[in-house]
Amino acid sequence: MKTDQNTRFLISELHVRGQIVQLEHSYQGVLANADYPPAVAELLGQALAAVSALGSIIKLRGSIIMQAQGDGPLHTLVVQANNAGEIRGLAHGYEALNEESKFSELLGAGRLVMTVDAQGGKRYQGIVQLEGEQLSDILGTYFEQSEQLKTSILLAANNRRATCFLLQQLPGRGGENPHESWQHAKILSDTLTEPELLELDVEQILHRLFHQQEVQVYKPVPLTFRCRCSREKVIPAIVQMGHKEAMRLVEEQGKIAANCEFCNQAHHFDRIDVAGLFKAHAKAPARPQ
Ligand SMILES: [Zn+2]
């Protein structure tokens, strides 16, 4: 079975399009950076699969970040995908969790923030309340609010694989009875079970649902786990610390070590690095972004 890819499909007859994202190695790459309890790892997998699909639906040319912030034990969940098919993600606040909890219990009340960084510096943000039993419910609400297109999202993850099955009505008035066509397609896709989402490949899933229709399947887009963190991106945080505090840390520890939480890569700054950094900063003070 081929995984770590996003396959788009189109069923003109039913006036719908869709995507099937199936992650395995990229998902494992994200999980390897922390010791997540199973319930958190599953939620992270669902979020990663979802953000991979959303990136392509909004004709992304930069990156999309989905961040859930709630008052539950798992107070932060962040996932990101970019137009190169690179994904990453992390969760905070899982230390005290040991039992399997439901999504609504993990995150509690709060909001889901979608930030789209388009190429060229444009940024769009959408916010939806964390209300629903599952992440897929919340994403469904997000689409109802932000787009006028009917969208159905199914998510599944099991610590090994993660899948997002997304079905969306096509824009425009197509077909003889678009409402009936949508209902038909949605009822069919709602019969997909979690094991089917995780174990069947794209061809099998589409055959299982739509063998009576003509389905146009596009070339899959590969997805990989990759973090684009760098030393340069850590610098503003050190500068913000202030010269005195930064030098105190260097005295104390010999260096400033900043570990990237997405990929575990360590970025080190020794005494000379820190001194040089503040010298450069003094010459060219950072402009507000
Ligand atoms: Zn990183």
Image (cartoon, rainbow, N blue to C red):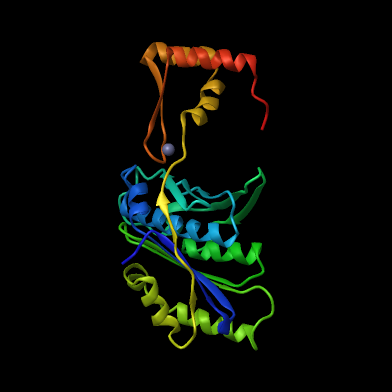
Tag count: 0
The quadrant the C terminus occupies is top right
Q: Residue at x 47, y 45 (%)?
A: 76
Q: Quadrant of ligand 1?
A: top left
Residue 49, position as x, y percentages in the image: 44, 59
- Viewer-nearest residue: 112 or 219: 219
Would you place residue 33 above or below residue 198 in this image? above
The residue depicted at 63 percent of the width and 71 percent of the height is 149
Give the quadrant of residue 15. bottom right
Residue 72 locus on image (x, y percent): 46, 49
Is 246 placed above or below 19 here? Answer: above
Image spot of residue 262 (x, y percent): 41, 41
| 128 lies left or right of 212 | right
Is residue 44 found left or right of 179 in the rendered image? left
Residue 166 visible from this viewpoint: no
Q: Quadrant of residue 211?
A: bottom left
Q: Residue at x 51, y 14 (%)?
A: 276
Most extreme residue toward the front, as rendered? 219
Q: Quadrant of the N terminus?
A: bottom left
Q: Relative to 275, is 5 on the left or the right? A: left
Q: Nearer the viewer, residue 199 or 35?
A: 199
Residue 106 in sight: yes
Q: Position of residue 246 (x, y in %)?
A: 48, 16
Q: Would residue 66 be found to the left or right of residue 289 on screen?
A: left
Residue at screen point 31% across, 69% down: 199
In this view, 250 is above or below 155:
above
